[in-house]
Amino acid sequence: MVVIKEIKGYFHFENDIENEGGKPSPLVKLNRFFAPYVAKLFLYTPITGNQVSFLMIFLAFVICVLFSFGKFWYSVTGVVLLFFQIHLDYIDGLIARYKGVPSLRGVFLDLVMHSVTGPLVFMGLTVGVFKNTNSMFFLIFGMLATIFSFLATAVKDLKDEAFMIKLKRYAEGKRLYELKGKKLEIVSPEEGKSKQFLFWKRSIRYIFLYLTFIYVPFVLIFSVLFNFTQWILVFYGIAFSIRWLIILIYEFDIDYKCLEFLFKPYKPK
């Protein structure tokens, strides 16, 4: 017998990137409330967490096609499926952990799903809007929204990849001379920063909270119902571009100082 209380014990609260000040947003709380009940339905079937992740990837392509028609009811259906797809993101991990089979492959699939959903949604919206307006203006901003919806989330992943490349080389005993004489310590990214800098950082982080893709369906449902989706493309085309630039500068500025201790096992004696 699958027990809801037991399912809730498999949540990974620290993975909720929408947290602000350590507290989950109302949307996260809502998803957490319904997720165990939906997961319970899946747990009565042989469906695995990875299969749910594949379903989310498939739904992203379906949603893209629906939006590309540029028709009202197709777009409404696309938004409804998008809400469902995003909610499933809380389900796959629950199923895998409940069944005792969490894996790095599951994490990989989850990252793939997140990397394709935003671009596919904005690609579909751009095609649909261009069919209805035949406007290069909206096409350009739609393309920007499509491209930077991916790039804005990929900056940290690319930075982590650069870190892993170095770490793997050191673990293989290569290029250890680069660590010779290097001081290794844990340094906070905020160490030495002024109060004014920290204030603006928190303010920007709060703004970025509502520019994450999880909030896009709430904007789209109104834009589809009241027929102003083309201006949503303009907004996200600009917002995502600026967000990408700010994240890029920030990640470059803080460097890897807070992670240097991970190189310590490979430092020459």
Image: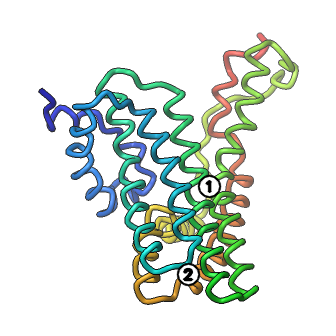
**Residue 59 picture location, percent across and down:** 48, 53
Numbered disc in front, either 2 or 1: 2
State the residue at coordinates (37%, 66%). 80
Q: Is residue 29 left or right of residue 67?
A: left
Q: In the displayed image of the protein, which residue is found farthest to the top?
A: 269
The answer to which image quadrant residue 250 occupies is bottom right
Q: How crowded is the residue under tag 2: few (<14 C-alpha within 10 Å), some, or many (20+)?
A: many
Relative side of 126 to 30, left or right: right
Residue 64 visible in image: yes
- Amino acid type at circle 2 is Ile
Is residue 91 depicted above or below 167 in this figure? below
Kind of residue indicated by mark 1: Thr
Residue 199 visible in image: no
List x then y, in percent, for residue 41.
Answer: 22, 40
**Crowd band around label 1 with a 10 angstrom C-alpha radius: few (<14), some (14–19), many (20+):** some
Label located before the other in sequence (2 or 1): 1
User: Who is closer to the viewer here, 20 or 220?
Assistant: 220
Image height check: is 233 above or below 108?
A: below
Q: Secondary structure at mark 2?
A: helix
| Residue shown at the point (40%, 33%) measured from the top left | 49
Residue 153 is tagged as 1
Q: Residue at x 45, y 80 (%)?
A: 72
- Residue 184, percent from left and from top: 69, 29
Which mark, residue 232? Answer: 2
Left or right relative to 158: residue 88: left
Indicate the position of residue 65 as horizontal and vertical percent values. Answer: 56, 63
Q: Are marks 2 and 1 in contact (CB under 8 Å)?
A: no
